[in-house]
Image: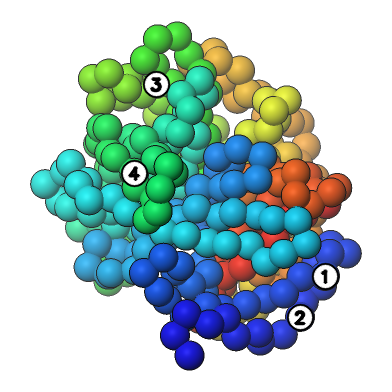
Amino acid sequence: MKGVCRIFFIVILTLNMVWLFSCSKTPNQPAAINGFSGMANIDSTRFLAVHDEKNYQNGPRVSVIITKKDSNITVLPVEIKDWRHAEGRSSDLEAVCSIPGRTGEFLLVESGHWDGKFGRMFHIKLNLSKQPYQATVLGVFELPEFDAKGPGDVEGDEIEGAECVALNGDSVLVLLGERGGSSVYPTGLLRWVVADLGSDSLLWTEAGKKGKTVEAPGVWQNPSKNRDIAALHLDTNNILWASATEDPGDSGPFNTVLYRIGTVTADITNPIQLDSQFTVARSISGFKTEALAGPTTKVKGSTFSIGTEDEIYGGVWRPIQ
C-alpha cells in the first residue's frame, strides 16, 4: 500500500530495542531504505541527512530526520530547486556539517570528482517553516581534484566525512575526511581548508592539502580494504570522532567501529591534534555506518546518533549509548 510502513523485523543494538522499517515513497516522506551517507544535528531532536544519489538518479538528496519520544522517527525530504552550478544537482553527497554561528546553514560535500566533473561543496540555508521543507543554495565551492576518479577501475578521491569549525567573519574551517581502503589512499586522510562564505572561495595551506593520515583501530577481515573514515563528528567538547567500516560488497557482511581521532582547535595551520593511540569506542556488527552525529534528547542516555548505508539492505537510523 502506498504511503504505509511495513515492519520487517526487530533488531537489538547497544541495548536499545528498535524497529527496522521501510516506507513506500510518497511526496512528503522518502523511504529510509535509501540509506544515509552523512548527518549533522539541526538541534537537539532533529538531524539533516544527505544521500548518495548520483547526478543521473532521481532519489532524495537531502532529508530531515525528526526524532520523537517512544515513537518511530520521521524522515522528510528537503527540496532544492536551484543548485546554482552548471553541472546541476548534486552527485554522490557523502558528508554534511552545520556552520557554527549560522542557524540553519550547512555545507553539503560530494565525494569528489568523477571523470572530470562534480567534486563540489554546497553552502545551503535550510527553511523548515512549512512543508515540503526547502533549502536554498547560497554558494558553491569547487574542491580540488587531488587524485582523478573515473569510469572503470580508476580509483581516486573519496571524501566521506566533513566538520565545520568557527573562525572570524565569513570564514569557516572545514575538515574533510578521505575514507581510505584504496590503492590511491591505503589509509584514511584528514585534510583542512578555510572556506570564505562571502566569496565562495577556498584557502588551502600546504599542510592542509597534505593532511594527516589516520588508520582506524579494530579487527578487519581484509585490513587493506577497510575504510578508516566513513563519517566524522565533532562533539561539543571539540573532540573529533570517526566511524570506520568494512564493505566487502553490496551484500556485506558489514562491520563498523566508532573511535576517537583527537581534538580540534581553530588553528588553521594545525587544527587537528591526533591521539597517540586510537581505540575502539563502539563496535557495530552487521551495519555500515556512514553518518555520525550527536545525540537526541528524545532518547535518554544516547551519546551518538548513527545512520547506515547498507547497500541492498537499505539504511537505518539509531541512537547509540
Label 3 CA crowd tier, 10 Å (few <14, some 14–19, many 20+): many
Residue 10: which numbered mark, if any?
2
The residue beneath circle 3 is 194
Q: Amino acid at mark 4?
A: Ala
Residue farthest along the left direction in this orientation: 86
Label 1 CA crowd tier, 10 Å (few <14, some 14–19, many 20+): few
Q: Looking at the image, how many numbered discs can be counted on the residues?
A: 4
Q: Are marks 2 and 1 in contact (CB under 8 Å)?
A: yes
The span from disc 2 to disc 1 (Cα, nearest Å) is 7 Å
Q: Position of residue 276 (x, y in %)?
A: 76, 31
Q: Amino acid at mark 2?
A: Ile
Residue at 36% in and 23% down: 195
The residue beneath circle 1 is 17
The span from disc 4 to disc 1 (Cα, nearest Å) is 34 Å
Q: Nearer the viewer, residue 206 or 17?
A: 17
Q: Secondary structure at mark 3?
A: strand
Residue at 76% in and 80% down: 10
The span from disc 4 to disc 3 (Cα, nearest Å) is 23 Å
The residue beneath circle 4 is 135
Q: Nearer the viewer, residue 237 or 183?
A: 237
Q: Nearer the viewer, residue 162 or 18?
A: 18
Residue at 75% in and 44% down: 297
Q: Nearer the viewer, mark 4 or mark 3?
A: 4
